[in-house]
Amino acid sequence: MNLRTSLRELPENKLFQKGDVFVLFGELFDRGYANGLVEQARAAGLEIIGFTVGRRTESGELRPLTDEELATAEARLGGRIINVPLMAGFDQDAPAGGLKPQEIIGQLTLENWKDAKFDWDYLAECRKIGVDRFRSSAKEAFAKLADMVPEDKNIYFAHIMAGGVPKTKVFLALANRIYKGTGPRFLSSNDFIASDLGKLVLQNFEEVTANTFDCLIEGTAAIRERAEKNGKQVRYSAYGYHGTEILINDVYEWQTYSNYTQGYAKIKLEQIAEENWEKGIKATVYNCPEIRTNSSDIFVGVELPLFSLLLAMKKEGGGEWVDKAWNVCRGLLREDVSLEMLLEKTQTLNASEVFLKNRDFAAWPTPNAPDLAETVIGVSREITQLHQSNHALITDNLSALVVNAAGMLIFKDMSEPEGPVVWLNHDIVAKQLIESAPKVSL
Ligand SMILES: NC(=O)c1ccc[n+]([C@@H]2O[C@H](COP(=O)([O-])OP(=O)(O)OC[C@H]3O[C@@H](n4cnc5c(N)ncnc54)[C@H](O)[C@@H]3O)[C@@H](O)[C@H]2O)c1
């Protein structure tokens, strides 16, 4: 049984017009998925309004952007930014005089983290303080937004927040072992999430990656109702990840990166969309392909499925633009390496036993495993070395193309989304790329 709703046909924008409003819930940084969506909103003539995560002072207090930072952020966005710090999560929130969860984690060592037991009543207090802080800042920001949004325009809200990694030495060392460790440096993701530390980190992920979507939908109810009363429509999109169908031996097959520890929070994000959809609110999570961004670079090997996109482009029609894209990729490889050889390597890998046993949709997010880590990390490193420079990788190019295509697909599809959770697989990304033929350059 296919449990997934996937976008199979290129959508059309039947709703958004010049003068409508696009609201980005999260701060725009280079490279990330949101850039593709903002580009589409800009091209369609929507007014763009954004938010900021704020910055921290030396003593760790959250503060708004300075005038200079605000000007830079607004120039990058191409719109106005509501300058109220919206940093989600509770890793740096605590009752007055008490230790912050980040400080509690900071006291652990690589020797004792596994058996460390936390005071969950105290951490629940910290969580409540963090959630209340975020919700009250969001309320203030939404009140400003209500004054900025015209009453007679359609509104597109785009949620992009994902994260919640506590910045402590011990956690970063453990993350390195879960996502980059092999042999004696391998750490089981199941062991990690079974520990109190793992449970705390998952709670923080849930606050940042999932519950902020709920906060957005709930906190903008008045703006939504006002627009709807005026005959206008409101949409909410969010970026999910729940594996992707890629071309393996000429058939589109679902596969996933493992262990995607944020996966539990992404499942909650999907549930939030489903609950709101049932209430008649058009909220859709788009599960997007694996790409390389500032946030995903920690997951070594997450980029490997991207190579199959080159094959999908041929299967979905090929043509002059696809040949050009292939040639651009070819040009990044060492002279003694052919693109065909590299693709054969990734296809063999995708069809290998170690990958096949990881392909359990019902068990997602599947744990990491020593043999999987060894293979994924080994091949990822090996492929990087086949390039002329590790600062210009084929997967950088392909990531940029996917960001562009996903932006077009999501923006257009949001005028009439099929459901609360929609997968964008390599077939539709390839079709979109062939149709729009974005600029590809070395
Ligand atoms: N990179 C991938 O392979 C991939 C695949 C599928 C889906 N996605 C999703 O796409 C979205 C954008 O991610 P991206 O990979 O493009 O990277 P990104 O780094 O550009 O985006 C991450 C966003 O999360 C925000 N954020 C991080 N911590 C936050 C916090 N504590 N409070 C508030 N905001 C916070 C950042 O400001 C940024 O806007 C995310 O939801 C991500 O999960 C990424």
Image (tube, rainbow, N blue to C red):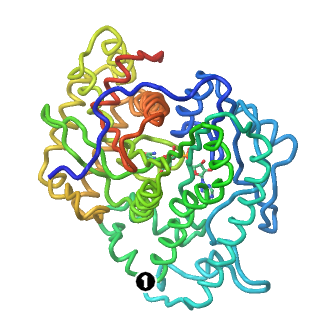
The tally of labels here is 1
| Image x and y of residue 220, in percent | 65, 53
| Image x and y of residue 85, in percent | 75, 56
View extreme (top): residue: 320
Residue 64, quarter of picture = bottom right
Q: Which of the two residues, 401 or 211, is positioned nearer the viewer here?
A: 211
| Image x and y of residue 144, in percent | 79, 49
Residue 63, quarter of picture = bottom right
- Residue at x 49%, y 88% (from the top left corner): 116
Q: Which of the two residues, 79 or 16, is positioned nearer the viewer here?
A: 16
Q: Which of the two residues, 384 or 355, is positioned nearer the viewer here?
A: 355
How crowded is the residue under tag 1: few (<14 C-alpha within 10 Å), some, or many (20+)? Answer: some
Q: Is residue 34 visible?
A: yes
Residue 88, quarter of picture = bottom right
On screen, residue 428 versus residue 26, left or right, reads left
Q: Is residue 240 above or below residue 424?
A: below
- Residue at x 25%, y 38% (from the top left corner): 246
Q: Which of the two residues, 372 or 309, is positioned nearer the viewer here?
A: 309
Kind of element beneath mark 1 = loop
Q: Is residue 392 visible?
A: no
* Three-letter code for the amino acid on which mark 1 is drawn: Lys
On screen, residue 437 versus residue 46, left or right, reads left
| Image x and y of residue 224, in percent | 63, 48
- Residue at x 50%, y 42% (from the top left corner): 293
Instruction: Find disc 1 in the rendering and name its residue.
Output: 114
> Is ligand 1 closer than 8 angstroms to the Cβ of mark 1?
no
View extreme (right): residue: 67
- Residue at x 65%, y 58% (from the top left corner): 219
